[in-house]
Image (cartoon, rainbow, N blue to C red):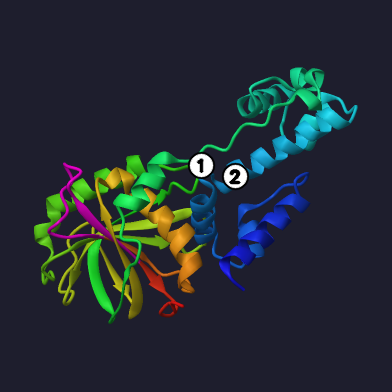
Amino acid sequence: MNYLHQVQKALDYIEAHLDADISLARVAREAAISQWHFARIFKALTNETLKSYIRSRRLSNALDKLLTTDERIIEIAMDTGFASQESFSRAFKKIFDLSPHAARKLGKRNMAVQKVKFDAEYLRHIHQNISLTPEIYSLPKRLFIGMKTEFFSVDSEKNNIAEKLPPLWEEFLAHIDEIEHRVAGNMYGIIKQTPENSDRLEYYAAVEVSQVAALPAGMSQLELPATTYAKFRHDGHFDSLNNSVNYIYSSWLFASGARHNYGADLEIYGAEYNPNTDDSVIYYAIPLERKPVYG
């Protein structure tokens, strides 16, 4: 089964349960993909979080009921999962730019469908700022030492990257010289799923070491197994890195025949990285189950 079929199975499950409570973990299980990776793929494909998509589909379903039934608005609100008619009306107006009462009064024939908006910045980015074909290579088991935090990524409506990662890197860089046996060259942002397979992630600001003699205060040891990676070059500021990751998860994974092995993704910061300008290079690597086969 490929990723598209798996995502479609999840969408079919959502459509069949719009009037019931929908667990994000259950949706991912229906797709047979881990929760974060399903959320990452879904966001890359739709530019929408899974939670916001479910809410939008429920509101679209509510609109259909408003226009085709005589159900009271409060009943439709409750069926859509809102605690009150007021909260339903606010969410409905945000999506459709008019109140539920006004939509019902306007009628189906006069409801204008909003045009799909293309993300011009993303289209420009994938043509200019990312290597569309990655370097595929394998590495042996490696050891890292770094500082760790947990965060919610852009795939979650709880996204708190801006609050969590810059302070972590600032503290790590202030103490990096305390790490013994560093392997010269790169620093790494290591992104892992948490053990409970939720939408919360572990992030390590780290360096590779040849051995672990002692752990500086506040730091953790991490071992990555022998892995095959697909490594992409991202040109530009860190703020646009998510465009590159979206390309990797939405376009490249689907076309390559490769599959993510649910291990750690790597942000790789080397000599070409400059945090203060757009004239900068970051490499982003994902771990693969096997080498992709190109036709």
Residue 160 pos. (x, y %)? 40, 42
How many marks the image carries: the answer is: 2
**What range is drawn magenta here?**
268-285
Q: Is residue 7 visible?
A: yes
**Residue that badge 1 annotates:** 157
Residue placed at 72% from the left, 47% from the top?
21
The percent coordinates of residue 120 (x first, y second) are 42, 40
Residue 81 visible at all? no
Q: Is residue 249 left or right of residue 30?
A: left
Q: Is residue 191 left or right of residue 173?
A: right
Which residue is labeled 2 in the image? 51
Q: Image height check: is 3 above or below 78?
A: below
Q: Locate residue 255 relative to residue 113 in the image: left or right.
A: left
Asked whether, in this view, residue 254 is left or right of residue 99, the answer is left
- Occupied quadrant, residue 231: bottom left
Q: Amino acid at mark 1?
A: Glu
**Residue 276 shown in magenta:** yes
Asked whether 180 or 46 is in front, the reply is 46
Among the 4 quarters of the image, the one containing residue 167: top left
Point out residue 170 in the picture as x, y percentages from the top left corner: 19, 46
SS under mark 2: helix
Residue 181, percent from left and from top:
11, 72
Outermost right residue:
70
Q: Is there a contact, CB below 8 Å, between mark 2 and mark 1?
A: yes
